[in-house]
Image (cartoon, rainbow, N blue to C red):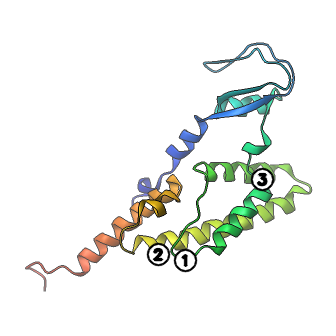
Amino acid sequence: MNEKLLDIDFFEFDFENSVVKMVCTSPCPEIQVADRTVGPLKGGMEFETYYWVADELAKAGIARFRDEDLLNLKELHKYCWRESIQSARRVSSLPTDFYPRLRRLLFSLKGSGGDSAADYDKALRMAQDIVNCRLRKIVSLASAPPLTDEVLGNMTGEERLLYNVLRGAVQQWRSNIFKTEAGLK
């Protein structure tokens, strides 16, 4: 299968260019981040900017992400539990930016060291459980009759991409199995 069919880089690009809210950690004059101007900012002030700018500001210690905008272990556990109780023909809804946020959570826990090693292992297990559970459902749904918009609406963009590729492959395979054209031996 063509690897480009499942390339999710454009979902990452969309996430990096989405607008997020930040909290300024200390007073900051107007600064340039690439082609963007940020500030001036007062300590404690909330502001919005693109994620890629926000990430640079966080790395520089100028601002921090709001806690409610970051995926954490408690929230990940909630998604894991919710997915596990759904029927085999149903995926629970996830935020559209779930997978980019999940990658960032895993990256931050992996790089923290110390007590975070256990948290990283726990988060990785839950993430794998979520992905494996949803993957089984998507594969099953791709070979079933067409889905309703409600079911498709519960899938993230990355999952809809996988569903569409699998569905096309299944339909092509079925079509080839039941070929009745002349010339078959």
Q: Of tags 2 and 1, which is closer to the observer? A: 1
Q: State the image quarter where residue 32 is shown.
A: top right
Q: Say which mark, if any, is on residue 140.
A: 2
Query: Does residue 1 appear in this view?
Result: no
Q: Residue at x 57, y 76 (%)?
A: 87
Q: Which residue position is annotated with label 1?
A: 88
Are the residues at dot 3 and dot 2 in contact (C-beta closer than 8 Å)? Answer: no
On screen, residue 17 versus residue 166, left or right, reads right
Are the residues at dot 2 and dot 1 in contact (C-beta closer than 8 Å)? Answer: yes
- Three-letter residue code for mark 1: Ala
On screen, residue 74 versus residue 80, left or right, reads right
Q: Quadrant of the C terminus?
A: bottom left
Q: Which residue position is annotated with label 3?
A: 72
Q: Of tags 1 and 3, which is closer to the observer? A: 1
Front residue of 118/68: it is: 68
Q: Quadrant of the N terminus?
A: bottom left
- Three-letter residue code for mark 2: Ser
At numbered mark 1, what does the secondary structure look like: helix, strand or loop? loop
